[in-house]
Image: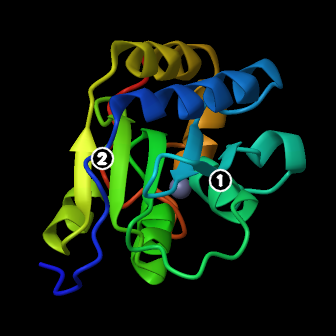
């Protein structure tokens, strides 16, 4: 557990609305519907963004990294919360630990299980809302664009999990 006396506040489920709006914006733009926001200790939205793999031709532009970059330089991340519509991949889970973000609020971990258990084991305050809107958004997207989802989670053509990807090497549910 963290020894720091600075901790993130209990997350407000309403913060998810910002991330969900970002996910929907991403979908409307032809992209992958994953949105995120970085929230300050007083509930201020420090940054927000969505996955831009398609829009920017950039596989490193995840929702969480977009929100993180949008927030600019922050002096201290311990009392901030990363809000994301989907369980964060290893890359974004690594970002949370690299910068010492204190809490993660997750819309759902049903369609994809990333690194949230690992984060919790290392003292990050993790909350999974299991929001049906987030589940539906991903289920509909995966059904409509299975090849794009495979690309995002690092499943190479033919079904092999690519070395670089695998959102945490987690076995993915079969496309629905
Ligand atoms: Zn990610």
Residue 88 coordinates in the image, percent (x, y): 42, 52
Image mark count: 2
In this view, which residue lies farthest toward the right? 56
Say if 30 sits above or below 125 in the image.
above
In the rendered image, which residue does mark 1 sit on?
A: 67
Observer-side mark, 2 or 1, equals 1
Disc 2 or 1, which lies upstream in sequence? 1
Residue drawn at x 52%, y 48% as measured from the top left: 153
> Which one is in front, 111 or 124?
124
Residue drawn at x 28%, y 30% as measured from the top left: 110
How far apart, in angstroms, are the residues tagged by discs 2 and 1?
27 Å
Residue 55 coordinates in the image, percent (x, y): 86, 40
Query: In the structure shown, which secondary structural element does the residue marked by tag 2 occupy?
Result: loop
In this view, which residue lies farthest toward the front? 42
Q: Is residue 154 visible?
A: no
| Pointer 1 local density, CA inside 10 Å: few below 14, some 14–19, many at least 20 | many
Image position of 56 (left or right of 114): right
Q: Is residue 25 visible?
A: yes
In the rendered image, which residue does mark 2 sit on?
A: 171
> Which one is in front, 149 or 65?
65
Say if 78 sits above or below 82 in the image.
below
Residue drawn at x 69%, y 55% as measured from the top left: 66
Residue 175 coordinates in the image, percent (x, y): 43, 23
Say if 142 sits above or below 46 in the image.
above
Kindly identify which numbered label has been placed on residue 121. none
Say if 143 sits above or below 8 in the image.
above
Image position of 99 (left or right of 147): left
Query: In the structure shown, which secondary structural element does the residue marked by tag 1 occupy?
Result: helix
> Which one is in front, 101 or 137?
101
């Amino acid at each position: 557990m963290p020894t720091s006396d600075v901790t993130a506040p209990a997350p407000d489920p309403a913060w998810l609305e910002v991330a969900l709006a970002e996910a929907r914006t991403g979908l409307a733009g032809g992209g992958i519907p994953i949105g995120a926001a970085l929230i300050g200790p007083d509930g201020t939205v420090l940054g927000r963004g969505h996955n831009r793999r398609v829009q920017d031709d950039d596989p490193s532009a995840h929702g969480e990294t977009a929100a993180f970059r949008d927030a600019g330089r922050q002096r201290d991340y311990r009392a901030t919360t990363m809000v994301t519509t989907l369980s964060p991949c290893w890359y974004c889970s690594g970002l949370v630990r690299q910068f010492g973000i204190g809490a993660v609020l997750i819309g759902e971990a049903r369609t994809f299980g990333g690194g949230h258990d690992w984060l919790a084991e290392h003292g990050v305050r993790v909350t999974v809302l299991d929001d049906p809107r987030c589940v539906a958004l991903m289920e509909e997207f995966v059904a409509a664009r299975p090849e794009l989802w495979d690309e995002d989670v690092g499943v190479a053509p033919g079904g092999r999990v690519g070395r670089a990807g695998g959102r945490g090497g987690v076995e993915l549910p079969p496309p629905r």
